[in-house]
Image (cartoon, helix red, strand yellow):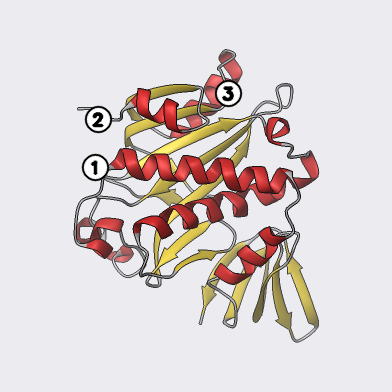
Amino acid sequence: MQAAFQKATIAAETFVRQIRQHESVDSTNNAALASCQTDRPQLPLLVLATRQTAGRGRGSNAWWSTHGALTFSLVIQPADLGIDPHLWPQASLTSGLAVCCAVDELLPHDQVLLKWPNDVYVRNRKVAGVLVELGPRANGTMVIGIGVNVNNTWQNAPAELQEIGTSLQDVTGQSLCLNQVLIAILRQLERQLTRLGHRDEQLAADWQRRCALAGKNVQIVSQGRHTTGACQGIDADGALLLQTADGLARFFSGVVAKSW
């Protein structure tokens, strides 16, 4: 049974122009990318799924979710928000920041942090993830996939994930309205992506302030190489900064293998 998303309310209270809802898809990003290739949707396009069977994270990572999770993709035309191609690599961090700001509204007494490059953490556990992919080059679209653990209690997660994830329900002790969470995130996406398009210099300070890895020792895998160093935060270009034995290193892509 489809979640009771209130499409009229979502459209009225956010910058979304078209909404497509699915009972079940392998990945909302896949469905969104297919829409970009087969027709000309009104943008921003919101693709929702009650159930996602093969959600994707970065690289080969999978996204585990069950009923009660919020899984959606937003298709935008970056140029409409003033986001030039050289700023596209910063869209993932900016979208992650948007999720952080939305979760702030729901958890005013908790510290919501951004784990470079695309995860949102509460109480040292992952509560949301972002996956940004580009649509066909010809139409210049961008797909922002977001998964948030809302009412899918982590007590039901696989044993190997028990210690690394949580849900908003687990943190608050109560069920939340998926519509309200979705609208809060969409509003923040418009706000933060517009800041990116306007080259808001304060954006980098907001990344830095929320950096979950700052001050920790980090091992990162980038282009097949393992590098270990002390994290100095995130710079204005969205690069993760590590103070290594060979000096300060900047990483624009990679996987954080571990931190301590």
Q: Residue at x 67, y 48 (%)?
A: 195
* Relative height, residue 35 to residue 228 (above, below): above
Are the residues flagged by discs 2 and 3 in contact, CB closer than 8 Å?
Answer: no
Q: Earlier in the sequence, mark 2 or mark 1?
A: 2
Task: State whether residue 153 is above or below residue 35.
Answer: below
Is residue 223 visible to the viewer in this orientation of the structure? no
- Nearest-to-viewer mark from 3 and 1: 3
User: Mark 2 packing: few (<14 Cα in 10 Å), some, or many (20+)?
Assistant: few
Q: Residue at x 76, y 50 (%)?
A: 199
The furthest residue to the front: 13
Amino acid marked by disc 2: Ala
Q: In this rendering, which labeled residue sits more in front, label 2 or label 1? A: 2
Dot 3 alpha-carbon crowd within 10 angstroms: few under 14, some 14 to 19, many 20 or more: some
Examine the rendering and report whether any part of residue 247 can be seen: yes
For marks 2 and 3 on the same chain, the one whose residue lies earlier in the sequence: 2
In the rendered structure, the answer to whether residue 171 lies left or right of residue 9 reads: left
First in sequence, mark 3 or 1: give its number: 3
Name the secondary structure under disc 3.
Answer: loop
- How many numbered discs, if any? 3
Going by the numbered disc 1, the residue's amino acid type is His
Report which quarter residue 257 is drawn in.
bottom right
Q: Residues within 10 Å of mark 1 (few under 14, many from 20)?
A: some
Q: Label 2, on which residue?
A: 4
Residue 116, image x, y percentages: 58, 63
- Find disc 1 in the rendering and name its residue: 67
- Mark 3 lies on residue: 43
Mark 2–mark 1 distance (CA, rounded to whole Å): 13 Å
Q: Amino acid at mark 3?
A: Leu
Q: CA distance from mark 3 to mark 1?
A: 28 Å
